[in-house]
Image (cartoon, rainbow, N blue to C red):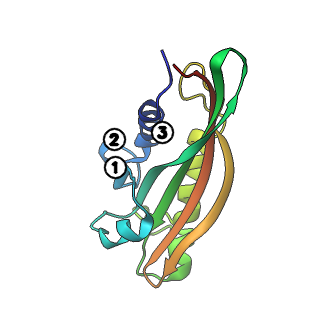
Amino acid sequence: MATTISQLEDQLLLRLSELTVSAGGDYVRTLRAYGGDFQQARAELVLILPCMLIQYAGATYKRQGGGGYEVLTRWRIVAADNSHRGEQARRRGTTANLQNPGTYQMLEDIKARLDGEVLLAGTRPLELTGEELVHAEPNLSLYRQDWHVRYFQVVD
């Protein structure tokens, strides 16, 4: 059975779902796949924070023998939090409010659940390739992690 983008996305959501409040986790109120850019999502920030958004960012294909390709898929995971306690609390969280852990803790939690994990049989382990600030403002902190998943695919 061929690996699909939908299957990979479902596995990423599943691996992070234990952080959601609905699954008994500590703090993530919104976890979902997202296909647009963050500026569009921000307009919707009906998203309940803290949130994590997973986005398929494309793939590269390298021809291998036998009609197959080595596929490198790129994924972005955005971690967003807010706090009225100030800029540092948005990044670092506060011990007084575990419902807002801060984006730094969220990034560490994502790494702990994904780094080196094999999402599906036939895929290589997840690779973290980057992390950066996406947006910061008085009541919002957003960081993005970039991940790669490699696998072999025969194209019919």
Check the image and report above or below for 149 versus 132: above
Check the image and report above or below for 31 versus 97: above
Element type at mark 1: helix
Q: x, y (%) of residue 91? A: 55, 71
Q: Is residue 10 left or right of residue 105?
A: left
Callouts 1 and 2 close, C-beta under 8 Å: yes
Residue 83 location, quadrant: bottom left
Q: Which residue is mark 1?
A: 21
Q: x, y (%) of residue 59? A: 58, 42
Q: Type of residue at label 1? A: Val
Callouts 1 and 3 close, C-beta under 8 Å: no
Residue 23 tag number = 2
Instruction: Give the tally of numbered discs.
Output: 3
Give me the residue at 64% from left, 18% from top: 67
Q: Residue furthest left?
A: 46
Q: x, y (%) of residue 50? A: 40, 62
Q: Which residue is mark 3?
A: 12
Q: Type of residue at label 3? A: Leu
Q: Is residue 153 left or right of residue 78?
A: right
Residue nearer the viewer, 3 or 77:
3
Report the Cα–Cα distance between label 1 and label 3.
17 Å
Residue 30 location, quadrant: bottom left
Give me the residue at 60% from left, 20% from top: 122
